[in-house]
Image (tube, rainbow, N blue to C red):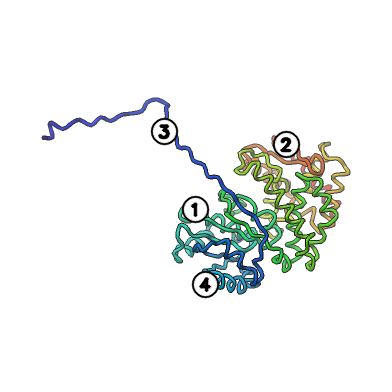
Amino acid sequence: MSMSEATPVTVRTHTSDQPIACLQASRPTATTITRASVAVETGAASLANALASRPALVVMSSTVNRLYGDSIGRALRAAVAAEVPTCVIPAGESNKTTQSVLRLLERAYDLGLSRDGMMVGIGGGVVLDMVGFAASQYRRGIDHIKVGTTLVAQVDAAVGLKCGVNVGSAKNLAGAFYPPVSVLTDSQFLTTLRQLDIRSGLAEMVKLAVATDEAYFAVLEDSASTLLDPSQRTSATAEGLVDRAISGMVAELNANPYEGDLRRRVDAGHTISPYIESATNYAVPHGEAVAIDLGVFAVVSNLMGILPDADLSRLLELLKRLGLPLFHPSLMDADAVSRALDATAAHRGRKLRLPLPERIGSTLFVDERLTVPDDLMRHAILILKESWT
């Protein structure tokens, strides 16, 4: 057939709003959260069982590696009859960056980690966030396991679907919803924590209770100090406190896993706490910032006529009794606090969606930024300053 006899090509153009096709995708997930022995060499086979003979890269913080790296390594070698590659990374919010995640991705690639491989994060919230984010990016997503070694990690960071890193002064600006396939919880890790780290975890537990569960709040009033005693951190009482916090967090997440509704009760304590952390270059740890945030907005709620005096007193008394702060000098920068509220509103879809305690165990939401004027914030902060100093 000559060129002149070729069938002409017809180019169709779409001029309507009708779609060509509709791609529908969903990814149902299920994360098992179990108590398992990981820290002690004789029981660390629990981790090997979770790996199910799949290739893996184990990522630990430098502290965890120093305290438990040898025993975990020996247990894994004995269980899988092979060396499991390990990557040790520095912890701390200042290291929670995209650059750190890129180094993890490069390490996994250099090791030849395949698409059916796994990443295992063993550490505090910073390490678990970075490992989760790296796993979500590596080969467009591989499975990962989280082993929380701090109290904050066990009751919060290890349990959630979210992972991410800080960008500049913006906390968790880059991230993903990427749930782990398994979470292993071992109270043995808590025995070597500083009191500061335990208190940070207790702040998250108090947050959950004041926002969602009055009965749990009463239990914390009675028994939370158990976790402050290193000799009691593996006791049934201590483990029960942690397990109840995990169950409560999971119940909240199951109802709204991908934050289709930006009104989240578990956002209590997380409105201006990111500002406090970044303003102090993370000298104020996450849990202490959460405690201060809880105190500020409990007073705000009380000044607005929502939270009764008795409930405000209960909350502030429990925070003080656990050694948690209620004030930090960074709050005296009224303009910065105002900008922090604006930034939170931007993160929550241009509405403040502020969870305020209306009583212990119950939450009321304030959507509009103007409902929480700057002078009200200053008044609440001054009240806390006077009660704390």
Mark 3 or mark 2: name the one nearer the start of the chain.
3
Q: Give coordinates of residue 155: x percent, y percent.
A: 70, 55
Which residue is pictured at 67% across the width and 51% down the height?
A: 274
* Residue wearing tag 4: 81
Compute the Cα span from label 3 to label 1.
26 Å
Disc 2 residue crowd, few under 14, some 14–19, many 20+, Cα 10 Å:
some
Q: Nearer the viewer, residue 158 or 380?
A: 158
Q: Helix, strand or loop at disc 3?
A: loop
* Residue wearing tag 3: 21
- Foreground mark, 3 or 4, reads 4
134 sits left or right of 263 in the view? left
Kindly check if marks 2 and 4 are in contact, taking CB atoms under 8 A apart as contact. Answer: no
Q: Given the image, on which type of amino acid does mark 1 rest? A: Gly
Q: Quadrant of the C terminus?
A: bottom right
User: Which circle marks residue 59 in the picture?
Assistant: none
* Residue wearing tag 2: 366
Relative to 331, residue 9 above or below = above
Disc 3 residue crowd, few under 14, some 14–19, many 20+, Cα 10 Å:
few
Q: Helix, strand or loop at disc 1?
A: loop
Q: Nearer the viewer, residue 169 or 308?
A: 308
* Residue wearing tag 1: 141
213 sits left or right of 279 in the view? right
Q: Nearer the viewer, residue 14 or 338?
A: 14
Q: Nearer the viewer, residue 350 or 316?
A: 316
Mark 3 or mark 4: name the one nearer the start of the chain.
3
Q: Is residue 123 visible?
A: yes
Which residue is pictured at 86% across the width and 48% down the height?
A: 314
Compute the Cα span from label 1 to label 4.
27 Å
